[in-house]
Amino acid sequence: MSVEDILKLVLKFFQETDKRLEELKNKLSVWDIKQQEILHYIENHNLNAAESCKLIKLLKNIRSERRIIKDEMDIIRSVKDTFIDKYKNKFIEKDLIQTIKNLKQLEVRQNNPKYTYQFLTQK
């Protein structure tokens, strides 16, 4: 992985953490609604053993999906609280963007070297 790739990842990390957290909150909300629908269905219907078993399996699946989302949210919040909120500001993002531009210019210059010969042209 190149330095430029690492800088791009860091920039993306700073820029998209809040967005990812919001996406996860929305996903969690959807799974919460699904869970509530099952609980309301159980509350309002008389179920036989087969129906109960199907709903329990469905509820278990929903709870598993919710747990995956909540675990990722916990990780993101921890990183956000201890690192991103502390260091994220427009200066860092601008510096990262400028550094990436500088690296691109440097790469172009290195791939197309221009040198003025002085010693070889002297007679």
Image: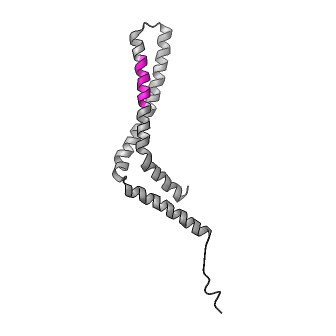
Counting from the top left corner in percent of width and height, residue 48 is at: 47, 6
Asked if one can make out residue 70 in the rendered structure from this viewpoint, the answer is no
Q: Which region of the structure is painted magenta?
A: 28-38
Give the residue drawn at x 59%, y 69%: 110
Magenta residues: mostly which secondary structure? helix
**In-front residue for pair 53/107:** 107
Counting from the top left corner in percent of width and height, residue 112 is at: 62, 70
Asked if one can make out residue 73 in the rendered structure from this viewpoint, the answer is yes
Is residue 11 covered in magenta?
A: no
Counting from the top left corner in percent of width and height, residue 47 is at: 45, 8
Classify residue 17 by image quadrant. top left
Is residue 36 covered in magenta?
A: yes
Q: Quadrant of the N terminus?
A: bottom right
How was the colour assigned to the protein in this rendering? one colour
Q: Quadrant of the C terminus?
A: bottom right
Give the residue drawn at x 42%, y 13%: 41
Give the residue drawn at x 50%, y 60%: 100
Counting from the top left corner in percent of width and height, residue 14 is at: 42, 50
